[in-house]
Image (cartoon, rainbow, N blue to C red):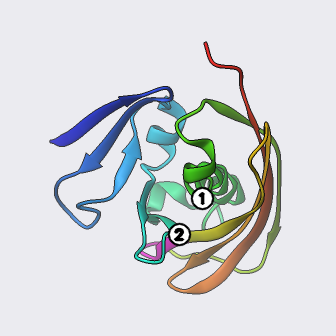
Amino acid sequence: MSEMVETSYGMLSVKEDGEFAGWRFWEGDPYETRSGPFFYRREEDGSYTSAFRAEPRHMNGGGFMHGGCMMTFADFALFAIATDVLNGDHAVTLNLSGDFLGSVQVGALVEAKGEVTRGGGKTIFVRGLVTGDGQPALSFTGIIRRLAKR
């Protein structure tokens, strides 16, 4: 069970139990829900951390995390990192680029942190880092485009 709040993106929920109790997640994106689920929370310093636990279904044929899974998670993290700048507005990813730095194994805690490098208008620029058990796995940059309100 989870607490739910309706936003312009869909349903924002708070996980009430398990490892990610107290973390937020979106129920409005079926692809991310099937891919993750991915979670995020605000840290004491005001920044945001996104996270999930690596499962066998996230791995590729070589036994480590599929690059597409890491990129999907980075896309999720873009919006978590930009939460305050977006202020609840709907937006889409214009560009997402990544450099793979290392592998992620089954069972690893996968986290993403980053910063908005430019925001405030319709276009928001973000950079971040995905880690697996604290080890760098993917450096990413992205551009988000705020959409007109419906």
- Marks 1,2: beta carbons within 8 A: yes
Q: Identify the disc placed on residue 6.
A: none
Start-end of magenta stretch: 106-111
User: Could you say where residue 79 lies in the image, as x and y percent from the top left?
Assistant: 61, 48
Left or right for 123, reference 13: right
- Closer to the chain start, of discs 1 and 2, is 2
Q: Nearer the viewer, residue 121 or 12?
A: 121
> Magenta includes 75?
no
Res 63 seen here: no
Q: Which residue is mark 2?
A: 47
User: Could you say where residue 111 lies in the image, as x and y percent from the top left?
Assistant: 52, 71
Query: Which quadrant of the structure image shows residue 126?
Result: bottom right
Pick out the residue farthest to the top.
Answer: 150
| Residue drawn where x is 48% and y is 54% of the image | 57
Q: Identify the disc placed on residue 81.
A: 1
- Circle 1: element type: helix
> Magenta includes 107?
yes
Q: Nearer the viewer, residue 61 or 16?
A: 16
User: Could you say where residue 64 lies in the image, as x and y percent from the top left?
Assistant: 60, 70
